[in-house]
Image: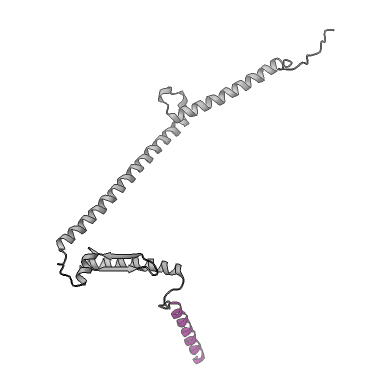
Amino acid sequence: MTILLSQFHSDSLDVTTRINKGRQRADMVKMKNARNLQVTFSKCHAGLFKKASELCTLCGAEIVIVLFFPGDKRFFSFSHSSVNTLVERFLGRNIPPPNNDVHNQQIVAHREANIRELNTKLMNLEGVLQMEKNRGESLREIRKRANGLWWESPMEELNLFQLQHLKRALEILKQKVEKEAQMVNNNAFPFQTLGSAWTPPNYAN
């Protein structure tokens, strides 16, 4: 029993060690691969800006963040209001704090602008949906008439698709009639072939 418990304890430690190794985080050192560095920077700076935005909304904090991409002249900034205003305040300039009412009005205006944009997109999508519905109704009407004798309807009641279909059907019918007429003519006069110099023998002699 002691041997079994010892073995079980050893196996448990081994599993725990493997799990802990699997959860180890990467070393906090600068990446050497330029592509990995760029991808990580893009992901992390987006997450940083998101957290800063949440902090501004929840706590009313005034935050400004300026990030310079490594080895590049590009920079990314975040601020709940004017970056210049917050920088001036940080440098000790005599700039009054922002009016919360104005800030709230800006938030409301921005929110309403987003709502208007979403409403415009929704209306466009509804228009496209209605066009597709109308197209579907037209196709169903065509199929419905196709199951019946829609070609017997007056010409003015047929749509463009049906007229084109009817024209093609008439062309095919014309070709078949001409072919049948040629076959009948050949059977009725088997020795009268175009361009043939041969004539049937004269059995009367």
Q: Is residue 42 left or right of residue 192?
A: left
Taking the view exactly as shown, the residue that stands out farthest to the top is: 205
Residue 71 lies, in percent from the top left, at 40, 69
Q: Residue at x 23, y 65 (%)?
A: 84
From the viewer's side, name the closer residue of 156 and 42.
Answer: 42
Q: Is residue 41 left or right of residue 186?
A: left
Q: Residue furthest right?
A: 205
Q: Residue at x 57, y 22 (%)?
A: 174
Would residue 139 be found to the left or right of residue 46 on screen?
right
Q: Is residue 17 magenta?
A: yes
Q: Position of residue 66 (x, y in %)?
A: 30, 68
- Is residue 61 among what the camera can see? no
Residue lying at 35% horizontally and 43% vertically, measured from the top left: 128
Q: Is residue 184 magenta?
A: no
- Residue 198, position in %: x, y? 78, 16
Q: How far across and how far down the image is residue 148, in percent? A: 46, 29
- The secondary structure making up most of the magenta span is helix
- Bounds of the magenta segment: 1-23
Q: Is residue 44 above or below residue 7?
A: above
Instruction: Tell me the residue at 49%/90% (across/down).
Output: 6
- Picture layout, residue 46 above or below residue 175: below
Which image quadrant: the C terminus?
top right
Question: Which quadrant would residue 176 be assigned to in this image?
Answer: top right
Q: Is residue 157 above or below residue 132?
A: above
